[in-house]
Amino acid sequence: MIGALALLSSANWRRGGPSLAGLALPGSVIGMLLLIGWLALVQKERPTLEAVSAWLTAHLSIMFVPAAVGLIEQGPALSRYGVGLVVATAVSTVLTMAVTALVFRWAARRGEPAEDAGA
């Protein structure tokens, strides 16, 4: 379990906006690519990582405590910009859902077998 936690932590170690081959990528994206590469190479890590991931997912609500404390500490900023933040979040969520639905429909149509014209 400690090894799997270390693997997940090491996949997220470069959070400062590093550059990979001249591209500015967030550290979490680089970590995700490294983790996928590691899991492709080392098959024996999967069961342990699944157990740790299941535990982390089961206790996901604990992960939101720091964010909630941060919101409470930023009360004046929220009172000033809160409405704009809520509107921006709602609009971006609706747009993301719409684009996701359109891409899914496009991909589903593309995956259907073609009908024969002579049949």
Image (tube, rainbow, N blue to C red):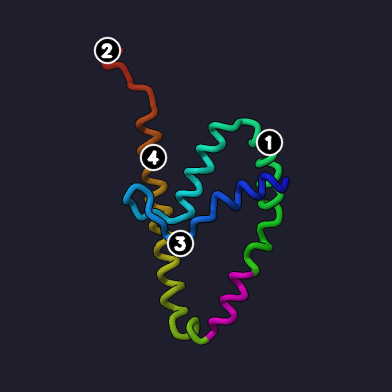
- Relative image position of residue 57 (x, y in whole percent): 66, 51
Camera-side mark, 1 or 3: 3
Q: Residues within 10 Å of mark 1 (few under 14, many from 20)?
A: few
> As shown in the figure, which amino acid type bears the numbered disc 2?
Gly
**Residue 47: assigned label:** 1
CB-based contact (under 8 Å), mark 4 and mark 1: no
Q: Is residue 70 magenta?
A: yes
Camera-side mark, 1 or 2: 1
Q: Is residue 68 magenta?
A: yes
Residue at numbered disc 4: 105
Residue at numbered disc 3: 16
Front-most of residues 55 and 33: 33
Q: CA distance from mark 1 to mark 2?
A: 50 Å
Camera-side mark, 4 or 1: 1
Could you tell whether 72 is left or right of 97 in the image? right
In what element is the residue under mark 4?
Answer: helix
> As shown in the figure, which amino acid type bears the numbered disc 1?
Pro
